Amino acid sequence: NKSPVHKSLIFRHKEDNRANKRKVSVIRKDEMRVMTSENIQVGDILYLTEDQEVPCDVIVLSSSHEQVCFDFDSLKAIF
């Protein structure tokens, strides 16, 4: 029988794997590419759409919406 801590670690590991395999559009070297979030590098520009989960720490450079908010509990951009 596994302890609650062990079960929590297994759950976290599965969630991390799921998050790392999420597809994201990235602009790198002036070229748009679709890749898994585990391959995002410092300096990449992410192209996010409404309700898309934010796969990493980001700085919002611009938006086509007047007001952009982020729901940090769900990690989703809210336009």
Image (spheres, grey):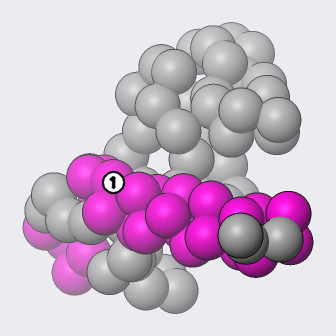
In the image, residue 56 sits, relative to residue 22, either above or below, namely below
Residue occupying the point 14% across, 62% down: 33
Q: Is residue 5 magenta?
A: yes
Question: Which image quarter: residue 32?
Answer: bottom left
Q: How many marks?
A: 1
Residue 55, image x and y in percent?
53, 56
Residue 50 visible somewhere in the drawing: yes
Question: Which image quarter: residue 72?
Answer: top right
Residue type of the residue flagged with mark 1:
Arg
Residue sitting at the far front: 1
Q: Nearer the viewer, residue 65 or 71?
A: 71
Residue occupying the point 33% across, 54% down: 22
- Residue placed under numbered mark 1 in the picture: 22
Start-end of magenta stretch = 4-32
Quadrant in which the N terminus is drawn: bottom right
**Label 1's element?**
loop
User: In the shown orientation, is residue 58 left or right of residue 18?
Assistant: right
User: In the shown orientation, is residue 28 left or right of residue 49?
Assistant: left
Residue 62, image x and y in percent?
59, 40
User: In the shown orientation, is residue 31 left or right of residue 51?
Assistant: left
Residue occupying the point 76% across, 64% down: 8
Residue 30, image x and y in percent?
19, 71
Residue occupying the point 26% across, 52% down: 23
Residue 12 visible somewhere in the drawing: no
Q: Nearer the viewer, residue 65 or 37?
A: 37
In the image, residue 35 sits, relative to residue 62, either above or below, namely below
Q: Nearer the viewer, residue 13 or 31?
A: 13
Quadrant in which the C terminus is drawn: top right
Q: Is residue 61 magenta?
A: no
What crowding class fits label 1: few (fewer than 14 Cα within 10 Å), some (14-19), or many (20 or more)? Answer: some
